[in-house]
Image (tube, rainbow, N blue to C red):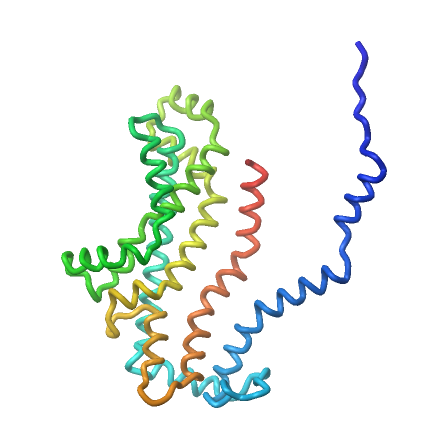
């Protein structure tokens, strides 16, 4: 038998690949510009939160923090119109509850659509994909009618229950289960006497951890930043944090930009903390899932 030999790529191809991997000054310039463009709005928001409202219209814009941050924080939490403390607590409860619910139910539904054989599986899969194409704003009026019928207007469950499952989460989990869970592993578990839920809990759920981390963080940020639905269904007495920030803007004569930016800074802090604490784990989970796939 004659051994087959691999023909090495031409020198020109190797040189082209090497040049593609090399960094140039233009690459660093583009990266630095992207970072500055992304960070500057957050930094300027914090700067205005440490100054008076007149700094928002100052030219050239103020780039260094002032000395009024503590005073603005006192005014923020003393503002009875915004109920900012209640808004922070409600957003934390709603975001955490919805994140846990979405991860659990979407992983369960994704497992069922990917691995279980039942009548109508294709129909339900297509229906999930179709829901992703419908804008959320289209369903606001029917949801408002439903909230009125249930008597949930102005209550926290109105911003929790409608979002406990997401079409994107179900589709994401289904695709991940298809790529990571072999049918042979499930068949072996069934031979050993495992029930369907036991297979999900002991085999599928541990394998889904990378996708669960990503979906949970994305869901938390989405619910934390939700504004339109909160404005539609809640009241100023029981707001979320985005609703509270909007209440800071309710003035017939002037806008206190320093107070608004202080509230926005506090509303951004939890997301930044989550990113810095779990950012490396998030990237690691994504790469782990990519390698397994």
Residue 290 shown left or right of residue 104 in the figure: right
Above or below for 139 versus 191: below
Residue at image x 46%, y 22%?
Answer: 184
Front in this rendered view, residue 239 or 278: 239
Q: Where is residue 252 in the image (x, y as percent from the top left)?
A: 31, 87
Above or below for 82 versus 5: below
Quarter holding residue 258:
bottom left
Residue 220 shown left or right of residue 20 in the figure: left
Residue at image x 50%, y 65%?
Answer: 272
Residue at image x 59%, y 39%?
Answer: 291
Q: Position of residue 267 (x, y in %)?
A: 42, 70
The quadrant in which the C terminus is found is: top right
Q: Where is residue 191 in the image (x, y as percent from the top left)?
A: 39, 19
Residue at image x 38%, y 22%?
Answer: 190
The quadrant in which the N terminus is found is: top right
Q: Position of residue 103 (x, y in %)?
A: 38, 47
């Amino acid at each position: 038998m004659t051994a087959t030999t691999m023909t090495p790529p031409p020198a020109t191809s190797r040189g082209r690949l090497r040049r593609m991997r090399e960094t140039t000054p233009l690459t660093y310039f583009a990266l630095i510009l992207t970072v500055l463009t992304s960070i500057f709005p957050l930094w300027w928001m914090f700067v205005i939160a440490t100054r008076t409202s007149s700094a928002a219209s100052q030219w050239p814009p103020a780039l260094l923090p002032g000395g009024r941050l503590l005073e603005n924080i006192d005014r923020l939490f003393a503002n009875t119109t915004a109920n900012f403390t209640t808004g922070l607590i409600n957003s934390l409860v709603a975001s955490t509850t919805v994140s846990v619910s979405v991860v659990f139910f979407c992983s369960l539904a994704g497992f069922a659509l990917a691995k279980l054989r039942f009548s109508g599986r294709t129909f339900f899969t297509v229906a999930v994909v179709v829901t992703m194409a419908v804008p959320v704003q289209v369903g606001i009026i029917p949801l408002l009618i439903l909230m009125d019928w249930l008597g949930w207007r102005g209550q926290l469950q109105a911003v929790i229950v409608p979002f406990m499952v997401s079409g994107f989460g179900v589709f994401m989990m289904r695709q991940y289960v298809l790529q990571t869970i072999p049918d042979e592993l499930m068949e072996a578990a069934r031979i050993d006497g495992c029930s369907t839920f036991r297979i999900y809990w002991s085999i599928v759920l541990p394998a889904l951890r990378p996708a669960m981390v990503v979906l949970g963080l994305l869901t938390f940020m989405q619910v934390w930043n939700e504004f339109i639905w909160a404005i539609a269904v809640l009241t100023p007495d029981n707001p979320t944090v985005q609703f509270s920030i909007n209440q800071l803007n309710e003035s017939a004569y002037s806008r206190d930009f320093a107070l608004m930016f202080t509230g926005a800074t506090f509303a951004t802090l939890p997301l930044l903390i989550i990113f810095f604490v779990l950012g490396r784990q998030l990237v690691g989970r994504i790469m782990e899932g990519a390698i397994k796939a």
